[in-house]
Image (spheres, rainbow, N blue to C red):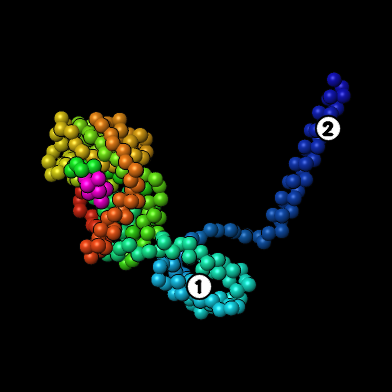
Amino acid sequence: MAENEVKNNQKVWYLFWALIIVGALVATQQASLPKGLRIEWRRVAMDGHRAGAKPITATNLSESLGTFTDSTYVTPSGVCFPLASEVGKTASQMKEAQATLAPLKVVIGHSARVMTNDRDNPDLPLGNLFADALRDYGSRYFKVPMDFAITNFGGIRVPMPQGEVTLDDISSMLPFKNYLCYVKIKGENLTKLLEQLSGTQSFQAISGATVRVKAHKLESALVGGKPIDPQRIYNVTTIDFLLDGGDNLRIGALAEDVKLSHVLLMDVMLDYVKGCEARGVLVDARADGRVIMED
């Protein structure tokens, strides 16, 4: 016992001295810093203001990334760097990667304007566009007129750009594997879904309905311009993510029947954008009062 006690006491002393040494090192390091030094983070916009670089598309490699000679890299703003420098090496790697990325840079359509995503505003052009495209595609795919569609704002990760729309834009907007599905929902359960959405901070993107919410409670709802019939079966298209817990929704539990597909939401939007381009029209959408939320 005495020998064990000695060993234990030695361990305690070792730990004690180790703490003293670490504390002294920290104090010495802090003392070496200039007095009053403050470290702050600030956000810098990725707008090309340092070198003139811009997002690379299918047709603007030289304008966006710059030019190269045998020994020099020249930024779009005219600053020169040796190719052997870190800047030159990085730019060269970006240039070499473009051959692999080329299929993603193919222009598939054109957008009338920038459309952003904001979960706190349920009546946004981008959310409305996605929900309308989902309802239209669901009607064609399942060969049943869809009364209602719902998708989640969280699945839309980047804005729709103005002008050229590439495959990369759409795949970046919708990077998740969310699949199209068709559910049959009784009117009384559709009302329950809308009531649940009314109690949240973000209503989610919908199509086919006009909803008014006051103080986070459903005040009125029309589907197809008519009040919801509690006993009627409504055809609803959505994504599998929302069937069983995604964004705290369990649409599957409210459904009379569920049909899944292997169609990604990204494929739905690709179909929509390419369809607009084939018809010679711009991708566009607007806020239209389909969801009004009052305090």
Please tell me which residue is depicted at 28% across the width and 34% down the height of the picture. Answer: 258
Q: Give percent across and percent down for residue 218.
A: 22, 38
Q: Is residue 172 above or below residue 79?
A: above
1 or 2: tag closer to the N-terminus: 2
- In this orientation, does residue 8 appear? yes
Report the disc number at residue 217: none
Residue 170 appears in which quarter of the rendering?
Answer: bottom left
Residues drawn in magenta: 133-141
Tag 1 secondary structure: loop
Residue type at mark 1: give it: Ala
> Between residues 214 and 251, which one lies in front from this camera angle?
251
Residue type at mark 2: give it: Gln
Question: Which residue reaches farthest right?
Answer: 3
Please tell me which residue is depicted at 36% across the width and 40% down the height of the picture. Answer: 241
Q: Give percent across and percent down for residue 65.
A: 48, 71
Q: Is residue 127 above or below residue 85?
A: above
Q: Main secondary structure of the magenta part?
A: helix
Near mark 2 (Cα within 10 A), the count class, few <14, some 14-19 or many ≥20, is: few
Closer to viewer: mark 1 or mark 2: 1
Q: Is residue 189 above or below residue 267?
A: above
Q: Seen in the image, is 190 located left or right of residue 57?
A: left
Report the disc number at residue 51: 1
Q: Give percent across and percent down for residue 110.
A: 30, 64
> Between residues 90 and 187, which one lies in front from this camera angle?
90
Residues tagged 1 and 2 counted as in contact (Cβ below 8 A): no
Q: Seen in the image, is 17 located left or right of residue 186?
A: right
Which quadrant is the N terminus positioned in?
top right
Please tell me which residue is depicted at 75% across the width and 41% down the height of the picture. Answer: 19
Q: Which residue is mark 2?
A: 10
Q: Is residue 262 above or below residue 66?
A: above
